[in-house]
Amino acid sequence: MSDTFFTGNRQSRRAWDTAKQKYMKPGSLTILQIQHDDTCKVFTTEKHCNCNPTRVLKNKKGHILASVDNVGSYDLRAYLGSEAHD
């Protein structure tokens, strides 16, 4: 398996940022679902993403609000750190 870190493409990253700004509002419930590849190292003891997962935002009823591919590898620390909440 590769240790590749995928950066995705600019258009996808911008679409993901737009979706987060539109749907992840204070006081509302938005579900973030990261759909990793089956071979991603996030499922091993190494615990880091080396795939290019699909990122999905859902509302509290489970309906898909946005789904974006090719954003790049997912790092949970980016959402738990200081820059996590825009």
Image: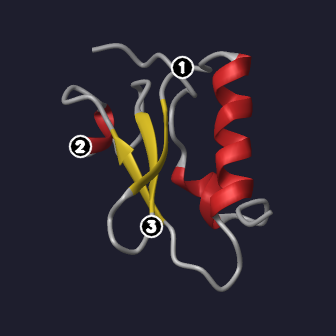
Please give left or right for residue 40 compared with residue 8 in the image. left
Q: Amino acid at mark 1?
A: Phe
Q: Residue furthest bottom?
A: 27
Lower position in the chain sequence, tag 1 or tag 2: 1
Q: Nearer the viewer, residue 45 or 8?
A: 8
Residue 65 coordinates in the image, percent (x, y): 49, 52
Task: Give the residue at mark 2.
Answer: 43
Task: Give the residue at mark 1.
Answer: 6
**Residue at the spot 42% in from the left edge and 40% down from the top edge:** 48
Which image quarter is the N terminus in?
top left
Select label 3 or label 2 by which is in front: 3
Q: How is the image coloured?
A: secondary structure
Label 1 crowd (10 A; few <14 / some 14-19 / many >=20): some
In the rendered image, the vertical position of residue 36 relative to residue 72, given as above or below: below
- Tell me how many marks there are: 3
Task: Give the residue at mark 3.
Answer: 59
Residue 70 coordinates in the image, percent (x, y): 52, 21
Query: Could you tell me how far apart the alpha carbons at marks 1 and 2 are, in whole angstroms?
Result: 17 Å
In the rendered image, the vertical position of residue 17 relative to residue 15, given as above or below: below
Q: Secondary structure at mark 1?
A: loop
Lower position in the chain sequence, tag 3 or tag 1: 1
Please give left or right for residue 38 compared with residue 59 in the image. left
Residue 78 coordinates in the image, percent (x, y): 65, 53
Label 2 crowd (10 A; few <14 / some 14-19 / many >=20): few
Q: Nearer the viewer, residue 7 or 77?
A: 7
Lower position in the chain sequence, tag 3 or tag 2: 2
**Residue at the spot 62% in from the left edge and 59% down from the top edge:** 79
**Residue at the spot 80% in from the left edge and 63% down from the top edge:** 86
Label 3 crowd (10 A; few <14 / some 14-19 / many >=20): some
Q: Amino acid at mark 2?
A: Phe
Q: Secondary structure at mark 2?
A: helix
